[in-house]
Amino acid sequence: MALFLCALTLVSPTHSSVQAQQPTGSIPTVTGTASGAVVAVDLSIPYVSVYSGPSTYFYPAIGVLIAGQEVPALGYSEDQNWLQIYYPGVTDSVAWVYGPFVKIVKSGSLPILAAPSTPTPASTPTINPTLVAAFIIPVTPTRLVTFTVPAPLVLPSFEEQTEASGLPVGLLIFGLGFIGGLGVLISFLRGR
């Protein structure tokens, strides 16, 4: 019987009070809205590359923003063509996007920021001087050219013909054209 009572107490529900830990201070809330300026990618562009600095030539691409994506803006470049944005997951959580590809959704005061230093390349290309020397063509010295006076320039001249000789060429051309036209007319009439 004692075994039965022990099993019954394990199975039967008991009412005990459970106390949860009560917060002792203020709890910050995450709202998801950025303070300051916010930019969005233009909807007509499927995606925009973001760079580690304000140039596509000197800085590498580090990510993309898709059409309509909104991100907080942190400042302008010195030429005001690029915007520095908050981009988590990269160094210092900042990236640069080209200004004409985005529009300002929420305006705010944006400072002008200096460009970061350009990244050091992994390797510096150098030219092997031995290889370069193989492609240098040696220049052999030659005598200077001497000046030779050219022959005098003879300009052709045409003499005018004052005397008419024979049949005029225009009349000959007109006569042959007339005879050709008669031949075409006769062959057209014979074909009917």
Image (tube, rainbow, N blue to C red):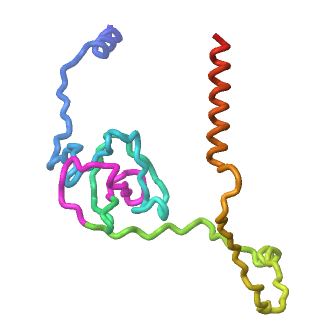
Quarter holding the N terminus is top left
- Establish if 125 lies above or below 180: below
Residue 93 in sight from this viewpoint? no
Residue at image position (34%, 59%) is: 82
Q: Position of residue 140 (x, y in %)?
A: 85, 86
The answer to whether residue 56 is seen in the rendering is yes
* The stretch drawn in magenta includes residue 96: yes
* Residue drawn 36% across the image and 52% down it: 87
Q: Is residue 72 magenta?
A: no
How many marks the image carries: the answer is: 0
| Residue 49 in picture, x, y percent from top left | 43, 49
Could you tell me residue 119's position as x and y percent?
Answer: 50, 67
Q: Which residues are magenta?
A: 83-111
Front residue of this view, candidates 83 and 183: 183
**Residue 33 or 8: which is nearer the viewer?**
33
The residue depicted at 64 percent of the width and 65 percent of the height is 162
**Is 18 on the left or on the right of 48, as rendered?**
left
Residue 9, image quadrant: top left
Position of residue 123 measured from the top left corner of the image (x, y, whole percent) = 63, 67
Residue 180 located left or right of residue 136? left
Vertical placement of residue 142 versus 125, above or below: below
Question: Which quadrant does the C terminus fall into?
Answer: top right
Q: Is residue 170 left or right of residue 100?
A: right
Q: Quadrant of residue 99?
A: bottom left
Q: Looking at this view, is 64 or 34 the one in front?
A: 64
